[in-house]
Amino acid sequence: MTIKIYRGKDCVHHDVSAEHPEHPDRLYAIDDQLLSSGLEMICQHGDAKQVKRENLALAHDPYYVDSIFQRSPRTGVIWLEQDTGMTPITLSAALYAAGAGCDAVDWVMEGEDRQAFCAVRPPGHHAEYDNAMGFCLFNNIVVAARYALKQYELSRVAIIDFDVHHGNGTENIIAGDKQIMMCSSFQHPFYPHTGSPVSASNILSAPIKAGATGEEFRKKVSYWFDALRNFMPQLILISAGFDAHAEDAMGQLRLREDDYHWISKQLRNVADEVCHGRIVSMLEGGYNHSALGRSVVAHIKGLHGDEQSH
């Protein structure tokens, strides 16, 4: 199996409160399901390094990056906005989370038929060019995408985001960037109340009404795959949020594990055709711990190209 799972040393230590939905237990739940499914034994594993500050500047205003470093507290919790807190360990966790994406890009690009999944937090897709938002400090997926473009002199990468919430930060940063295509599905209207209409021609959007099933989700996003084949990305990156699952109280979509397996396998098929199977996936949302763990297992099996086993 060519899939490598990246983790960041402090990603399980970022903990703003026991009541906060973006909680360390999310990662433990994923690890539990990887063990019980047998994937833990057959995947490769990597310990991420912290992202270099210059790579954060590929996605963010350098003044914003400086402000995050300066505001990191020595004790207690500070709030960057109503949902996004920092403890003394949060900055380190966020640097590992962003670093995991760059390390995964390195590993995937240095071979063929390689896929990586970054089991990291805090998530990233709500973080805008100069703004923290929605549990996110740095936009991990855009950092990874821009790093790949620069480090490997690529000309085209694609970002696919199937979180229940629109990846407003990702769209904010990459709108109009002809080197990056973004395919985005999300419940609409819903937090953060963005994404429809799209802001630029490099964004493909699939807003979905509350209550929609996996069947409706599949119909809505099916046009992405031919568009991706036409764009011919040299690397596919995934903002993998699993909070559109029917058991997740954070949203009102009704996806199941089979739906995450399906879209992951479709993306793997595209990657095999256009970019030597190269995929980097990064964890975003997913707050029902059991559903999250099961969905990540289905996602990884789909990325590997496995037939669904349940």
Image: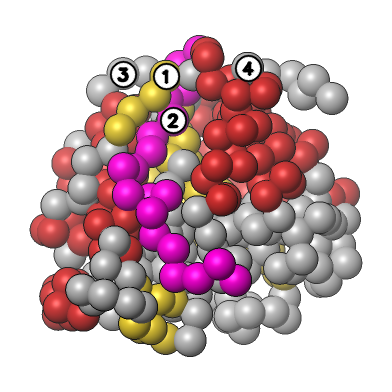
- Between the C-alphas of marks 2 and 4, the distance is 14 Å
Mark sitting on residue 111: 3
Q: Residue at x 36, y 63 (%)?
A: 139
Residue 139 to residue 104: above or below: below
Q: Quadrant of residue 297?
A: top right
In the structure shown, which secondary structural element does the residue marked by tag 3 occupy? Answer: loop
Dot 3 or dot 4: first in sequence order is 4
Q: Amino acid at mark 1?
A: Gln
Dot 4 or dot 1: first in sequence order is 4
Asked if the residue under mark 4 is in contact with the one under mark 2, i.e. CB atoms within 8 Å, the reply is no
The residue furthest bottom is 82
In screen coordinates, is 130 left or right of 153?
right
> Does residue 158 appear in this view?
no
Q: Which residue is mark 4?
A: 38
Please give the range of residues in magenta: 1-19
Q: Residue at x 25, y 57 (%)?
A: 92
In the structure shown, which secondary structural element does the residue marked by tag 1 occupy? Answer: strand
Asked if the residue under mark 1 is in contact with the one under mark 4, i.e. CB atoms within 8 Å, the reply is no
Asked if the magenta segment contains residue 11, the reply would be: yes
Q: Residue at x 46, y 42 (%)?
A: 119
Dot 2 or dot 3: first in sequence order is 2
Q: Which residue is mark 1?
A: 44
Looking at the image, is mark 2 or mark 3 nearer the viewer? 2
Residue 155 to residue 213: above or below: above
What percent of the width, then of the height, locates residue 194?
Answer: 58, 80
Q: Amino acid at mark 4?
A: Gly
Mark sitting on residue 5: 2
Looking at the image, is mark 3 or mark 4 nearer the viewer? 4
Asked if the residue under mark 2 is in contact with the one under mark 1, i.e. CB atoms within 8 Å, the reply is yes
- Between the C-alphas of marks 1 and 2, the distance is 6 Å
What percent of the width, then of the height, locates residue 67?
Answer: 18, 80
Q: Residue at x 79, y 20 (%)?
A: 309
